Image (cartoon, rainbow, N blue to C red):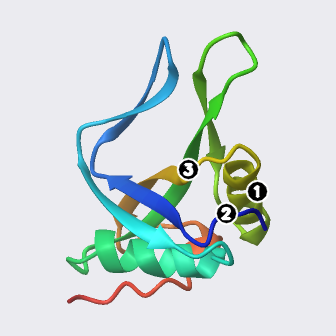
Amino acid sequence: MGKFKKFHLTIRWNGRVTNSDIGIDYEDGESIMLKIDPRFNFQELCDLCAERVCTSGQTRLGKITYRYPDMSAGGVVFQEVVINDDDAIMMMLQFLSDNQVRLAEVYVETEAVGKTHSPCLSNAVNTPR
């Protein structure tokens, strides 16, 4: 897939997702940038996010969204896509490769342990560290 050996992934959490003139935006919160392999899959994303974001044992992963630039309207407007399976990961990585973009940005929502959660994220490791 594509020319790149690695992509960069910025994971954001504990902030908020807003809608502005540039489309979807991530404000405040924390972030970390990691290198990922182009063969990256959904479970690996869940594990990475759980390890980095859910460190207290009191929260678990909720929804993960990807922010991508849509350049079809004459300018750049950021759109949001829910990442909930390997197909969504493949589409994200294919977009990056096709457009020669090396940075993906995702936002991770967390929820209190014990609440109903996204079934696709239930396999992520969420143990206290």
Q: Vertically, is 99 above or below 128? A: above
Q: Which residue is mark 1?
A: 94
Residue type at mark 1 is: Gln
Compare marks 1 and 3 and give the one earlier in the sequence: 3
Q: Nearer the viewer, residue 45 or 36?
A: 36
Q: SS at mark 3?
A: strand
Residue type at mark 3 is: Thr
CA–CA distance in space, label 1 to label 2: 16 Å
Q: Position of residue 26 (x, y in %)?
A: 38, 36
Q: Is the residue marked by circle 3 packed among few (<14), some (14-19), or many (20+) residues within 10 Å? A: many
Q: Vertically, is 13 above or below 128? A: above
Compare marks 1 and 2 and give the one earlier in the sequence: 2
| Quadrant of image for the N terminus | bottom right
Q: SS at mark 2?
A: loop
Q: Quadrant of residue 71?
A: top right
Q: Position of residue 16 (x, y in %)?
A: 34, 38
Q: SS at mark 1?
A: helix
Q: Position of residue 18 (x, y in %)?
A: 42, 27
The label on residue 84 is 2
Residue in the picture at 31% in, 73% down: 52
Q: Which residue is mark 3?
A: 65
